[in-house]
Image: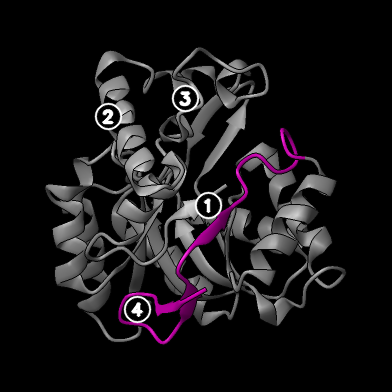
Amino acid sequence: MQQRYLGRTGLRVSRLALGTMTWGRDTDEHEARDQLIAFVEAGGSLVDTAASYADGDSERVLGSLIGDLVRRDELIIATKAGVSRRDGERRVDVSRRALLDQLDGSLRRLGVDYIDLWQVHAWSDAVPIEETLAALDVAVASGRACYVGVSNYAGWQTGFAVAHQAAWPGRAPIASTQVEYSLLARGIEAEVLPAARALGLGVLPWSPLGRGVLTGKYRAGTPADSRAATPHFEEFVGVYLDQRSRRIVDAVCRAADGLGLSPMEVALAWVRDRPGVTAPIVG
């Protein structure tokens, strides 16, 4: 697998990243082990998780495989902080206290001394952005993170964060942005992608397969073993089971037939090769 530099940093990452959102819940440790082995054997290095995935179990599963299955130095570990779930509700807290507390929890669950890429999971108007970004400075200065990034930021939010960090010596520069991007979700092309290119950020698209819809698996209904068949992912996938998405999926399937490829390969290659994209995150 090819390697690329993450934005303007010296961090080299694989051209595809392995996402672990379902690890510890829908994907057990045995399946996760098989996925990680296949990924590393194919030359993959960048593995993405988050403190909120499966209430921390995604990180725990990944941590149990580091050292036992792969060496720490074989992986570029990316995780995120700022989102949690209490009583089944998604909560965003990007205060310095919450972010650094989640960072320490991630380090414990992963069983590592540092995170390669630590990302703010979401924007919040409730917390001054200066406070949120100050947590990134502390993480890098303390050696708990090597590089930092943002996730799910709009174009102006991305620009503000990068400019703020660049305005004063000693602040941790923003290395990347992680955003949803696929043939079904192209909103970032208006502002986020141009901003990332102009500011030298690496772009890590999540759900490059349209939350699984671009594989074509939902054309004849909802398979019993699919994410859309689970209560916690039904709505997440369902937003792309509309008429507009069906037309796009049909076009991808026709292209795949003509090229002798699978719809998944066509959809993934489209995102992977878009200008500015560093590494789509597949799971």
- To which residue does mark 3 refer? 236
What is the CA distance from the residue labelled 2 to the residue labelled 4?
43 Å
Given contact means CB atoms under 8 Å apart, are the residues at marks 3 and 2 in contact?
Answer: no
Query: What residue lies at 32% left-to-right and 75% top-to-bottom?
Result: 7
Given contact means CB atoms under 8 Å apart, are the residues at marks 1 and 3 in contact?
Answer: no
For label 4, the SS is loop
Magenta highlight on residue 230: no
Q: Amino acid at mark 4?
A: Arg
Q: Determine whether 136 is above or below 22 in the image.
A: below
What is the CA distance from the residue labelled 1 to the residue labelled 2?
33 Å
Magenta span covers which residues? 1-27
Given contact means CB atoms under 8 Å apart, are the residues at marks 1 and 2 in contact?
Answer: no
What is the CA distance from the residue labelled 3 to the residue labelled 4?
36 Å
- To which residue does mark 2 refer? 248
- To which residue does mark 1 refer? 81
The circle drawn on residue 171 is: 4
Residue 107 drawn at (x, y percent)? 70, 64
Query: What residue lies at 75% left-to-right and 41% top-to-bottom?
Result: 24
